Image: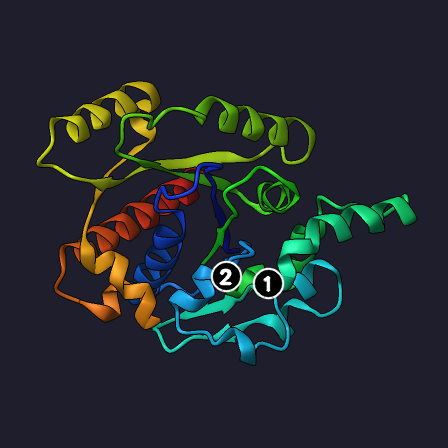
Amino acid sequence: MGRIIALVNQKGGVGKTTTSINLAASLGVQNKKVLLIDLDPQGNASTGVGINKGDVSNSIYDLLLSRCKAHDAIIKTNFKNLSIIPATINLAGADIELIEKSKQDPTYQKNLQLKLALEEVKDEFDFIIIDCPPSLGLLTTNALTSANSVLIPVQCEFFALEGIMQLLNSIMLAQKKLNPTLEIEGVLLTMLDSRTNLGLEVVEEVRGFFKERVYNTLIPRLIRLTEAPSHGKPIVAYDPMSRGTEAYLNLAKEVIEQDERRKQQQ
């Protein structure tokens, strides 16, 4: 059964989509079958793996609104073991449409649509990575209800922990009301400029707060990482020898090792 990991942070610009793309591709390079789900109306994860959104006939929007099955929305990318359910601009109105459908039909469960849609395909993948929008609305609630765990990217900046308590409260609420087995997969420190004392202080602060939940891997602030999506490629394909590639391959190894340990304990 595939492990479903939602990447969540209501703050924008923390490296969430960059991490979704590059973790998914790096898991694929390490012989894991991966499905990337673009749940952000901006659709940057789709563009970042080379999807032309004008060519998309079935997207995550269609899947959420039961207009297609999951198999109909999955597109194989040009990268090893990596498929995607893309997003288009239609997704921007999905929250309102899900609420309207729930008003019209009292049995319709607006928070469960993604979970129900993934039932038919989750066993076909080792990992399903969900790139959530930078908000805690209905799309993110669907992701939290579907996921086994949450990966939280945190930017190495002065206000790194600001808003984290709100996010943790949302995760606990999802655990209580929708998904009692939801776990925190890990906390990932991103955009580290190791030349500054501030960056290193933030690393210590976040590790002090989250303890062993923080990954050993630190994602550096690199021009190559920001360039790669504009070429429709994850960093592992855009610049295989870069420090960004090394970092995300190391993160993928940590995720795989954690998953293997979890299976041994079951």
Q: Residue at x 71, y 47 (%)?
A: 112
Q: Mark 1 points at which residue?
A: 89
| Up-down relation of residue 129 to residue 13 (above or below) | below
Q: Disc 1 vs disc 2: Cβ atoms closer than 8 Å? A: yes
Q: Which residue occupies 40% across, 24% down?
A: 162
Q: Which amino acid does label 2 sit on?
A: Gly
Q: Is mark 1 on a helix, strand or loop?
A: helix
Between residue 144 and residue 234, name the one nearer to us.
Answer: 234
State whether residue 250 is above or below residue 214: below
**Residue 214's x, y, as percent?**
30, 32
Residue 208 visible in image: yes
The answer for how far apart the CA atoms under marks 1 and 2 are is 7 Å
Which residue has dot 2 on it?
A: 43
Say the numbered circle drawn on residue 124. Answer: none
Name the residue at 61% across, 71% down.
73
Q: Is residue 105 visible in the rendered structure shown here?
A: no
Foreground residue among 135 and 130: 135
Q: Residue 32, relative to residue 219: is it above or below?
A: below
Displayed quadrant of residue 109: top right
